[in-house]
Every structure is written in structure tokens, then in C-alpha cells.
Image (spheres, grey):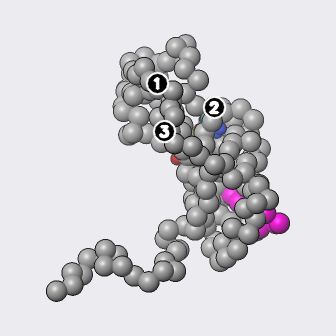
Amino acid sequence: MSDPSDLRANEKVVDLAPASDAVLRFIGRVRTPWTHRDDCPRQGRHDGPECRLVLDSVWHDALNGLDDYPTIEVLYWLDKSRRDLVSQSPKSDGRTVGTFALRSPVRPNPIGTSIVKLERIEAGTLVVRGLDCLDGTPLIDIKPDRCAFTPKAPPKPGDSHIQDD
Ligand code: SAM
């Protein structure tokens, strides 16, 4: 997605070799009402429309226990993004900032994250509110919201600021 005509004033591109050092395994697709990027919200809202996380059947058992959480974290691959911008001018107003100072979909590894409201789970499909991505966006991962999550494994020394003697 490296089209020079996409660039705004002061934006800076780097010349990158094709990425080949990691392989993701998509676990399903996100179904949303939006088919054009301009129609997507910039960030999802918990009072937004219902969206669906449709998991490949091999992962259905991986959802066991997830319905204990009213909010969950979703990671997805913003697959229509270019990946070579170092600086971006999000508002076309002359203000330019570094890519890592933004939550723009344009980044070296276009991972999107949202904390969404889990409405219900229907046979391998999660019905959620709070997404902002295009219909068909590949799904990378799902986790309990870290604020609500209590680790299931025993504590480790690094979990606490209290030092052992
Ligand atoms: N909530 C995520 C985050 O903070 O990591 C993503 C935020 S990003 C600003 C959301 C925008 O990405 C949408 O408004 C849309 O313009 C764009 N977008 C959505 N789906 C996309 C996709 N599959 N590929 C590229 N861009 C996408």
C-alpha cells in the first residue's frame, strides 16, 4: 500500500525491504457495518453498533470462560494500511508528528486494538460493541480486558513492588 499520492504535507516515508521476520495466524474475521475507511469511527464506542468477531471453527473452544468478562480486548490487522510512514500529518494542517505518537492505522505493523463491550457469544461468534474497523478485517487475538482480569497462575516475584529479603 505504498502509493506516493497518499502523502500529505511534511510526511516522511522510509524505503523498507519486504517484512519477512514474523508470521501471524489470523483466527477469524471482524464483521462490521463499514465498507469504506472514511465511514469507520476513528475509535469505537461502547454505544456503537453491534459488530461480530467470527472465529474459525478450530478456535471455538478457546472462547471457554471468556463470557465472564463484560469487556474484552480485541487485536486486529489493519490490512489496507500502508506501512512505510515515519511521520504523519493527520489533520493536513501542517502539524506533523511521529508515527508512534499516533493511533493511526498507518504503522510498520498495522495492529489495531480496541477494548470492546461483550454483548454475547453465539456459537463461535462474539457480538461486541466498540469497534472501528472495516468489514472483513482479519482478527489476530482476543483477551480479557486487563482491568478485569485476575491472573489464573500463581504470583511471581516480579508481580509486586515488594522486594523479598
Ligand atoms: N482502535 C484501533 C487502535 O487504536 O489501535 C484502531 C484505530 S484507527 C485510528 C481506526 C481507523 O483505521 C478507522 O477509522 C479507519 O480509517 C481505519 N481502518 C479501519 N479498518 C481498516 C483496515 N482494515 N485497514 C486499514 N485501515 C483501516
Q: Is residue 112 above or below residue 38?
A: below
Q: Which residue is mark 1?
A: 17
User: Which class describes the residues within 10 Å of circle 2: few (<14), some (14-19), or many (20+)?
Assistant: few
Q: Amino acid at mark 1?
A: Ala
What's the residue type where badge 3 is placed? Asp
SS at circle 3:
loop
Q: Answer left or right for 161 relative to 6.
A: left
In the displayed orientation, state which residue is furthest to the top.
Answer: 5
Q: Verify whether residue 30 appears in magenta.
A: no
Residue at point 39% right, 28% down? 86
Residue 33 drawn at (x, y percent): 77, 44
The extreme front residue here reads 21
Task: Judge: label 2 CB < 8 Å from ligand 1.
Answer: yes
**Percent coordinates x, y for residue 137 in the rendering:** 69, 42
Q: Quadrant of the C terminus?
A: bottom left
- Residue named by callout 3: 21
Quote the CA–CA distance across marks 3 and 1.
Answer: 11 Å
Above or below, 35 against 115 in this view is: above
Disc 1, SS: loop
Residue 143 position, x and y percent, is: 58, 64
The kind of secondary structure the magenta stretch mainly shows is strand
Which amino acid is tagged 2?
Answer: Lys
Label 3: how many residues lie within 10 Å, few (<14), some (14-19) or many (20+)?
A: few
Q: Which residue is mark 2?
A: 80
- Mark nearest the camera among 2 and 1 is 1
Residues in magenta, as a range: 120-129
Would residue 68 be found to the left or right of residue 136 on screen? left
